[in-house]
Image: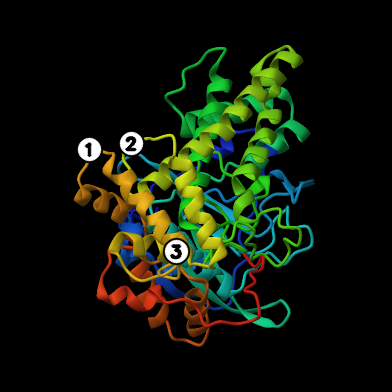
Amino acid sequence: MTKEETAIGWNLDNSYTNLPKTFYSTDHPTPVSSPRLIILNEKLAQSLGLNPNALKSEESVAVFAGNRIPEGANPLAQAYAGHQFGHFTMLGDGRAVLISEHVTPAGERVDIQLKGSGRTSYSRGGDGRAALGPMLREYIISEAMHGLGIPTTRSLAVVTTGELVARETNLPGAILTRVASSHLRVGTFQYARQFATVDELRELADYAISRHYPEIEAGDGRYLMFLQEVIKLQAELIAKWQLVGFIHGVMNTDNMTISGETIDYGPCAFMDTYDPETVFSSIDTQGRYAYGNQPYIGGWNLARLAESLLPLLHEDQDQAVEIAQNEIAACMKLSHTNWLNGMRAKLGLFNEEEQDESLVNELLSLMKKHQADFTNTFRSLRYDEEMELSGTTEFADWHVKWEERLAKQKESKEASQDLMRKSNPVVIPRNHLVEEAIEAAENGDFDVMEKLLLALSDPYEHTPEKVEYCKLPPQTNIPYRTFCGT
């Protein structure tokens, strides 16, 4: 490595290239004309063992832009497939290049990927580029998810390219540096089952186990245990989405990771008014990925993973199918249990009672009927504030039931309030706030985004500075829509 790279702290490795060549292609980023660093995640850099000041150097910015490949890196684009809105398609990294893996001082291995860095072998006619707005959206939302305590890929930096990308209009180009535990997806295993040999499928599974689940020992049952672990993490992840009103928007199987991290922030958004049928994605015309459908789609996606692993689960096809079906059935129960336990915490409940689910569902029904804001309702319960439901007889009756339920547990009122504080965010990246931050940044003002990011970094503390971020968007007859721009 150069002296500059050593000063940065890069510790690069390329374990993915130990897999058969069928799983990737050797692709390099396409250089850009005049890269400029827009934002650097200094806290993330420090947690990775990197020097933030050195990352701001001209040499480092050239790496973020794809103009320079650091010594020891072996850039590649990963192959994968996936069900997009239920239809199976051959895919792959069409506008992203995995520069290398970085091993932190603590021994943690992460992918360093450039998103929007040009065409690859899997681009399928696209230009491989990205616009500034969508890259800033991913930066904001992914860091907000991290602040909320939800597993997610992270954003290290965004650079502008000095070039325009042609969309509906010409937009300023940008590249996002994404950090992930890995970019292994359900779709990676679908690709292996469809286009690779069983031995190559086994190599991929062994690699995923070694990287993410090293506690799984060798033996006949290791691939079943692998499936169980992925199911467990995804059930936890989707329940956490539901508990904060996050809508992914495009839960295709290629957007579900093996590590249990949220990935790909395209048409995602956070729900304001509670409604299980809420959809923001402009292309989800049938509501397949609506808020209320996310647990079921998660189970459907995991069933596709189980199908891909059938040759490894048992040598007898019928028994393999039975094993897979049992695990998927357990998945749906686990997801529901995680959600219900999370809802108990949002209401300050420590123990379990038979009537808890009906208590939760009654509140949600009231929220839908009165078009109450999801986040603010739970926050107001914690801080005894006025809300949309206040003053209604139905809510007053529900509140009495809730108070009676709280009285049944041994924990104090103060303990319940503390549990609610830890379980109910005060601020979320509301859609209108994200749009305001992006618009300002596109016009050269980054203060709006930086202030929003600061508020989102500590979303559970109720402070005066956050009051502005709790306000609802202005009323409009035009529904908010997001697009697959990332």
**Residue that label 1 marks:** 410
Residue 258 x %, y % = 55, 38
Residue 363 against residue 133 in the figure, above or below: above
For image coordinates 68% across by 39% down, the residue present is 300
For image coordinates 52% across by 38% down, the residue present is 336
**For marks 3 and 2 on the same chain, the one whose residue lies earlier in the sequence:** 2
Secondary structure under the numbered disc 1 in the rendered image: loop
Q: How far apart are marks 3 and 1 (CA)?
A: 29 Å
Residue 255 x %, y % = 62, 49
Residue 49 x %, y % = 31, 52
**For marks 3 and 1 on the same chain, the one whose residue lies earlier in the sequence:** 3
**Residue that label 2 marks:** 351
**For marks 2 and 1 on the same chain, the one whose residue lies earlier in the sequence:** 2
Residue 277 against residue 209 in the figure, above or below: below
Residue 377 x %, y % = 42, 63
For image coordinates 56% across by 60% down, the residue present is 265
Please tell me the numbered disc located at residue 423: none
Residue type marked 1 = Lys
2 or 384: nearer the eye? 384
Local crowd size for mark 1, using a 10 Å CA cut-off: few (<14), some (14–19), many (≥20)? few
Dividing the image into 4 quarters, which one contains the C terminus?
bottom right
Local crowd size for mark 3, using a 10 Å CA cut-off: few (<14), some (14–19), many (≥20)? few
Residue 304 in which image quadrant? top right
Residue type marked 2 = Asn
Q: Can residue 72 be seen in this view?
A: no
